[in-house]
Image: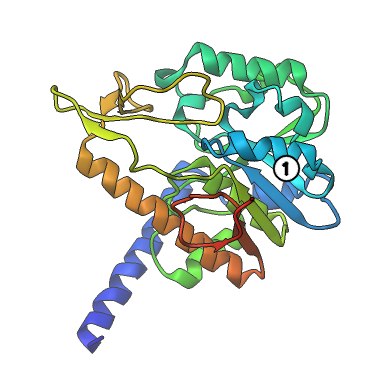
């Protein structure tokens, strides 16, 4: 790299770093909520299993239950896992919600109401619920889960960091900032690193995000989404941003750009985990993630 390019890169990253901290001043704060809350009675093995909601979990979860994996490793679940029967068998110590549909009126639905009701009435074990600090509509999570005393609510920062890599990792170590994560699992991975887990295993994290893409006759980008809890074959449905009202449809270029950033985010998490002496193992057969060590569950 030529000297002029190095200077331009330094100035650009310096500006981005400064802008990040200015945004944090206005939008969030500088408290390390995740690190301060710490782990939920961490398993001595310091091993955490994160359950994604990809279709492969339908085959992996029965094996995990048969092996009573929750007795060997701590468990983290995401999104709508609480609506499954397996939720009450696995009894995850950690739960992560990050999609805007969980705290914005524009994304509200009966299914989301049912999820919060399940957390409110069914969780009778100690569980940490991670939610975004950024909450422009002041959604009351405590009320939504019926002020369940078994659940502690811990916010995580979600302002995307752009700038110097060394400052980026400093922020992550201190519970600040985020990469441009595209999935809830990535927020879970970062939280797991921040609270001290040394081995993180991923199940049901297929990330087959390019499968089933179509464009209908109205030029709307559609996709067949498949989750482990689906009971009937899915049809291709138009894709929308959940945080806008009315919902705004995705374009192909926007979706592909977001997907590329999502996979880049896994590379950032891999590098940050390595800097902290943490190993991330992808145990999802057929997963499109190429950033982590693979050891698919047979």
Q: In this view, does 291 lie to the left or right of 11?
A: right
Q: Which image quarter: residue 58?
A: top right
Q: Is residue 93 visible?
A: no
Residue 231 x/y as whole percent: 53, 20
Identify which residue is drawn at 51% across, 43% down: 28
Residue 151 x/y as whole percent: 75, 30
Q: Is residue 188 above or below residue 196?
A: above
Q: How many marks?
A: 1
Q: Which image quarter: residue 90?
A: top right
Q: In this view, does 129 lie above or below 160?
A: above
The N terminus lies in which quarter of the figure? bottom left
Q: Residue furthest front?
A: 298
The residue where tag 1 is placed is 75
Depth order, front residue of 215/186: 215
Q: In this view, does 281 lie to the left or right of 26?
A: right
Depth order, front residue of 59/136: 59
Q: Is residue 202 left or right of residue 230?
A: right
Depth order, front residue of 64/186: 64
Q: In this view, does 280 lie above or below 54?
A: below
Q: Is residue 51 visible?
A: yes
Q: Residues within 10 Å of mark 1 (few under 14, many from 20)?
A: many
Q: Which residue lies furthest to the top in this view?
A: 110
Identify which residue is drawn at 65% across, 23% down: 84
Q: Which image quarter: residue 296?
A: bottom right
Identify which residue is drawn at 66% across, 56% down: 200
Residue 269 x/y as whole percent: 52, 60
Instruction: Name the element at disc 1.
Output: strand
Identify which residue is drawn at 42% across, 70% down: 164
């Amino acid at each position: 790299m030529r000297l002029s390019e190095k200077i331009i890169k330094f100035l650009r990253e310096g500006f981005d770093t400064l802008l990040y901290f200015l945004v944090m001043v206005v939008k969030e704060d500088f408290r390390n909520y995740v690190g301060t809350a710490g782990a939920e009675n961490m398993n001595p093995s310091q091993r955490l299993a994160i359950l994604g909601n990809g279709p492969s979990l339908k085959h992996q979860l029965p094996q995990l239950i048969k092996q009573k994996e929750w007795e060997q490793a701590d468990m983290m679940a995401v999104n709508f896992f609480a609506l499954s029967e397996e939720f009450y068998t696995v009894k995850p110590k950690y739960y992560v919600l990050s999609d805007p549909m969980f705290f914005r009126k524009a994304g509200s639905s009966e299914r989301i109401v049912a999820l919060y009701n399940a957390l409110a009435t069914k969780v009778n074990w100690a569980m940490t619920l991670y939610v975004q600090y950024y909450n422009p509509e002041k959604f009351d999570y405590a009320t939504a889960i019926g002020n369940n005393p078994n659940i502690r609510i811990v916010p995580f920062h979600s302002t995307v960091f752009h700038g110097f890599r060394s400052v980026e990792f400093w922020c992550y170590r201190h519970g600040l900032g985020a990469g441009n994560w595209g999935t809830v699992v990535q927020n879970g991975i970062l939280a797991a690193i921040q609270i001290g887990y040394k081995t993180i295993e991923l199940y049901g994290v297929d990330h087959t995000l390019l499968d089933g893409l179509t464009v209908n006759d109205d030029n709307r980008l559609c996709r067949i989404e498949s989750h482990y809890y689906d009971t009937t074959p899915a049809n291709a449905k138009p894709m929308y941003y959940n945080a806008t009202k009315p919902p705004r449809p995705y374009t192909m270029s926007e979706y592909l750009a977001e997907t590329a950033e999502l996979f880049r985010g896994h590379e950032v998490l891999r590098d940050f985990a390595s800097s902290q002496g943490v190993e991330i193992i992808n145990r999802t057969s057929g997963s499109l993630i190429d950033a982590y060590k693979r050891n698919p569950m047979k």
